[in-house]
Image: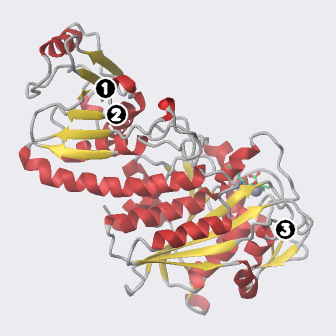
Amino acid sequence: MQVTISSGNNINGTLVLPLFEGEETLPEIVEGIPSSLKAQINRVLGDGDFKAKANATMTLVGTDGGKAMLVGLGKTEKADVHAYREAGATVVASCKKVHGNELTVVFHGADMACMTSFAEGMMLRDYSYDLYKKKDDDHEDTNLSARINCDEGDATALSAAIDRAASIVSGVHLSRDLGNCPPNDMYPMAFAEKAERWAKEYDNAKVEVIDYEAAKRHGMGGLVAVGMGSSRKPCMVIFTLNGDQKGRHPMLVGKGITFDTGGISLKPGANMDEMKYDMGGSATVFGTMEALASIGYPGKVVAITCMAENMPAANAQRPGDVITTLSGKTIEVLNTDAEGRLVLSDGLWKAGTDYDPEYIVDFATLTGACVVALGHEATGLWSNDDDFRTRIHEAGNDVGELAWPMPLLPAFEKEMTDSKIADTRNLGAGRWGGANTAAAFLKQFVPYRGEGDDAEQITWAHMDIAGTYWGAKTNKMVGHGATGIHVRTMVGLITGE
Ligand code: BES
Ligand code: ZN
Ligand code: ZN
């Protein structure tokens, strides 16, 4: 969706009017509305027939031409950037054939941040995944465009802010495209090839692929064990942005299970198709790299995605197997469906030993237990550093992507280490606190820096997006399918903007 800025007052296409509840009037500055439409709007607003509650909409079609969509922002004092973002998304979600392809938005005294947020909401919501549908009249590309009318003095700054938002949205949409892609076309090496193609678009981006043979050679026992039972072999993909910059840098790690059948510990059949989204962590990471590259972020960022397909097969790993991970630590695999933590054990270890990160954040659709705890409303957030956890929580709040603090307790870690025959085990003792035991398991694979008593674990956070990467019906930024959540959170955290 193209969003442009105009300092004129003319209307192209459908007039979009965001209004405050209790202050429903037509701004005087609007020019060029057919007189009957103007009269209709004034009559509807004057008679109190449109209450501008948050996300309420009404469409008016002028008897002598012109169309308008009224959209509610709620009460003035509550109309913050989040309300504007949701209203923008609501407008796009409510667009029908009658509204045409062009919108002109006229605000009633919104500041720059609110106008940008409204545009961001429109752009985020303007997404559908129809690559596999035949194009016909009902499924035509609509190519919606919007113009925002603003004061002349604001035009340049607003235009720059909206361009930046559009770049970040390209990363969110990339994450959704990757997640929505059917698993017969989205397998580990297909993801890697997409990453390699992406890197060619940017002079300052590089992608390295560690394929199955190399992963075996390097001793990536977690990644290999999960992926070996599939004919689509596993791989690790390493993205580097601005690799020539010196000093410590953010590091992202993503779980990329392109399909999770559970392996020999096979999942029940119902809704198993949704396990195509089990590469949501890797999609979040790839989308974030695209967003950062697209806004021209100058700092160094490295990301690792651990790609595998978890299949039951004659050559698949078994419950009871003991594997040796990249860290040298052995894991007793008690359930092959707890596979995300196995691939991440190698990703986290590599992230902390081959690089010198300021911090590591991993993203994973890791546990059903996290969905039990937080539903589809918030991502589970764990960290070994309270201040860092707060920073991520706040970065999420700033962009309307909730990440809820969860406890990283020694008792959970202990539960994961009491294997009789290996250093650690991939299953808790019981089913309680399953999201917490998973987080505690991962912590064992975050390297320390320094020697002896001075050794300190690298700052790390784990984000369980099992409930938020798809199926979040209250997320107004998306119709259905993958949400692309936390690309915006991460851009905020990394850039500080
Ligand atoms: N990918 C699943 C987690 C998941 C389940 C995400 C449902 C979203 C919706 C993960 O690999 C898994 O199967 N985890 C198991 C762990 C258990 C065996 C300890 C789970 O959550 O049941
Ligand atoms: Zn699983
Ligand atoms: Zn999984």
**471 versus 218 height, above or below:** above
Q: Residue at x 80, y 60 (%)?
A: 428
Q: CA distance from mark 3 to mark 2?
A: 48 Å
Location of residue 6 (image quadrant): top left
Q: Position of residue 466 (x, y in %)?
A: 63, 50
Is 53 positioned to the left or the right of 370 in the image? Answer: left
Quarter of the rendering occupied by the C terminus: bottom left
Q: Secondary structure at mark 1?
A: strand
Instruction: Identify the mark at residue 333; answer none if there is no mark.
Output: 3
In depth, the one of 386 and 112 nearer the eye is: 112
Name the residue that disc number 2 marks.
87
Q: Secondary structure at mark 3?
A: loop
Name the residue that disc number 1 marks.
72
Q: Position of residue 299 (x, y in %)?
A: 36, 76
Marked residue nearer the N-terminal end (3 or 1): 1
Is 114 positioned to the left or the right of 87 in the image? Answer: left
Q: CA distance from mark 3 to mark 1?
A: 53 Å
Q: Residue at x 28, y 10 (%)?
A: 49
